[in-house]
Image (cartoon, coloured by chain):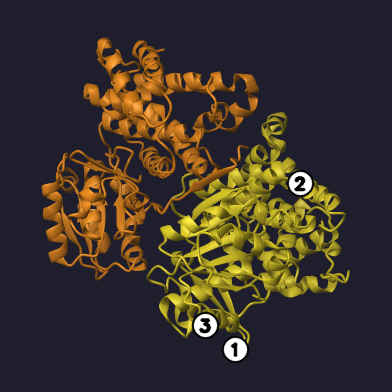
Chain colours: A orange, B yellow
Amino acid sequence: MFSPDRYEFFCPVKTNSGSRALEHLPFELDTMNATKPFVITSQKDARRGLVDVIIDAFKDSGVTIGIFDGAPAAPGMKLIKELFTMYRDGGYDSLIAVGGGAVVDTAKILNIAVSGAPEDIERYAGSDLITKPLKPLVLVPTLSGTGYESSRYACIDTLSFSSCFLMPHLVVIDPRMIVFEDVETTAAASLVTLTHAVEVYTGPEKNPLSDSYAYAAIRFVMENLVSVIRDPRDGKGRLALVNAHNAAGCAFSNSTPGMAHRLGKAVGDACQLSWGLCMGILLPHILERQTSEDGYHIPGLLLPLAGFDVYAETPEHMKVQKAIGILYDFQRDLFEASRGAIVRSLKDAEVPEEMLRDIARKAAGRSSTGFDADVSLMVLEQAWKGK
Amino acid sequence: MNLPGYYEFCCRVKIIAGHDALEKIPDALAYLRARTPMIVSDKGVAGAGLIDIVTSAIKDGVTIGAVADDVPPDSDLQVVHRLARLYREKRCDSLIAVGGGSVMDTAKGVNILISENADDLMKFSGANALKRALKPLIAIPTTAGTGSEVTLVAVVKDHERHLKMAFVSYFLLPDVSVLDSRMTLSLPPAITAATGMDALAHAVEAYTCLAKNPLSDAHALAAINLIGENLVRVTRDPGDKNGRLAMANAATLAGIAFSNSMVGMVHTLGHSAGSVCGVPHGVCMAILLPYGLEYNMHKNGHLTAELLFPLGGAQVYAATPEGERADKVIALVRRINEDLHEASGGRHPRFFREVVDREGKQMVPREKLPEIAKTALSDGSLFYNPEDLDYDDFLMVMETSWEGEPLERRKIKKG
């Protein structure tokens, strides 16, 4: 097994997952010395009754909670300032984010403000500028996430933040909250998850601790995504997927984002497509490219993708080919299970071919790791055509 | 991947690993806003020159406020109070614990006193009595086995009042654990062997007992794989730096796995043999591990079978028919014990009758086995064991593991 010469790993997240997990919340807050949490969620999740489950969990606990159920899809600084005032005037001492995506970004960024002052927010935009722990932040994820919820990342307006202090202290995965979402949302977060976990597991910063989180995430996505897309009533599968989102967020926070992540985002931003869909299309093409580059660990990927038996019976020299083949098969299975909604090529995603050169140049420009515009273009062209 | 009805998982310890990881301690302390650490250690560690290695690695980056390298193996409340006084006198602002379980426990006890500015440690005993972060604590393990660098428990004895205080809190987790190959390079083969088997027992029980979860499973699999590939090798060749680092990683992974999933009967009996006869914990784990797997086979044989993949490697796994994999794992664990016995010049015991103290005296006389079995009945770790054991069952396991005979499967009562 690969054991690197040196590495660092940090994951402050505690995970509680399973039946009635939310009922432990009052106790968990007490261990963090918090007594008055401020809940942030979206109108959509409030409307479908998810907040009621949270309220029930606090019944008889003696804990007073505040609820803001109006987090919009694109929160701005104005909202953060309003929430800051509500938090301060209400005497709250901790945050609970219920949902995914923008709700969690809002809570993370609000946490910067309430742990100091609203002026801090712009000062801390960037990488690793926050220098001390923030207020306790609990995440109660749903299936409507983006795959970034447990991670060290947050963004608002044009500002983006990266700090381990932004990661939730506690993630409570409760089956009652993991209700069905539409195919696109479900697939997008899980494909972001798969891409992140695979790039951690195969990338130059691979280490046994981030591998453990990545391994669990990859297994869960491979075992459950197709079946959940085919049959959204698969509750156990949905729960497993949210467990995967969480584990991958932890792994991804300990690694420099890889090429599939960066290119996928670039394509998604350029063409108003979901990042997950683009990353999912690009991933096997990029891995194929990386097999011939130094510093990547592609053969071992077969293990989390396919399990012990397939790994053990595949000869060493066939492992890369087999792993990539499994990812292409996975794209096909998703395409079929979603009745064509989850496409397998950038062409089918209606990315104009003439935009590829521009996307490649932009993605390479943003990159801090070594991949240039020519390589990016080559991969994009392959992914445009598809397998 | 198994997804249980409910589980919790948490390891907030930052891991810094490498052949030159110690050099990163000043930065790690600065990040925690500390710059005057007190080093806590014991004479064995200091005598092996390890404190010198630590101090020369960090002295340019921090001011070492105090060095207390005389924590006794059987540390207690008095030691904790004495070190807390020293810490205050020298105006330290953080702790670096270099050593094994007793040093870690002592440092955690000191940390409670100094952080809470308290005189009475008892007030904080039990589960979750601590409500806020303590002073920065950096753990540097000097064996690859116990995993205490990533556990949230501390036990402090009060010899005057004949008490044992246990503290359980996420705030007791070290802030940082530094795994540096230099810390275990001089470990003698017998200790390398026993501590490595301790880590294996943690990981195997985490994977095969009742409180397993997907994240503890993933950590356990990685630990078992690293141990399978490296433990016998480093016991034979103690200077193998990469092997040493791999084992340090394995012990930490195993520590994370078991502290998030609990353990079973191997630990139940191991604790008893330790407390009744003073057998080192790792030795108990090494001897008992195959018996625990045999005893539980009818309940968790399918999980034991899976472990052939990480322990024996992909080829052995593929070459062994499914129905024979669990037995093969047990045979492999026994084989590792044999190899360690040989690699340590016979010092690593394979059975309880082979365990001797420094003077060569047998540590577990046969007539002590009933007492060990009796003591095991009151150990909480049995709760997570797949199959129940009563006094007769414990005695049977102790007798066979004393002799070095395999368990007779037909004698196991199937509940």
Q: Amino acid at mark 1?
A: Arg
First of labels 2, 3 by sequence position: 3
* Circles 2 and 3 in contact, beta carbons < 8 Å: no
* Letter of the chain that mark 1 sits on in the rendering: B
Residue in front for this viewpoint, A146 or B394: A146
Task: Tell me whether marks 1 and 2 sit on the same chain.
Answer: yes
Residue under the image location 76 percent in, 66 percent down: B395
* Circles 1 and 2 in contact, beta carbons < 8 Å: no
In the picture of the structure, the residue carrying the numbered disc 2 is: B232
Q: Position of residue A230 (x, y in %)?
A: 35, 27
Mark 1–mark 2 Cα distance, whole angstroms, equals 43 Å
Q: Amino acid at mark 2?
A: Val
* Circles 3 and 1 in contact, beta carbons < 8 Å: no
Tell me the mark number nearer the camera, choosing from 1 and 2.
Answer: 2
Q: Quadrant of residue A232?
A: top left
Q: Judging from the image, what secondary structure is the residue with disc 2 in?
A: helix
* Residue B262 drawn above or below residue B214: below
Task: Tell me whether marks 3 and 1 sit on the same chain.
Answer: yes
Tell me the mark number nearer the camera, choosing from 3 and 1.
Answer: 3
First of labels 3, 1 by sequence position: 3
Q: Position of residue B283 (x, y in %)?
A: 75, 61
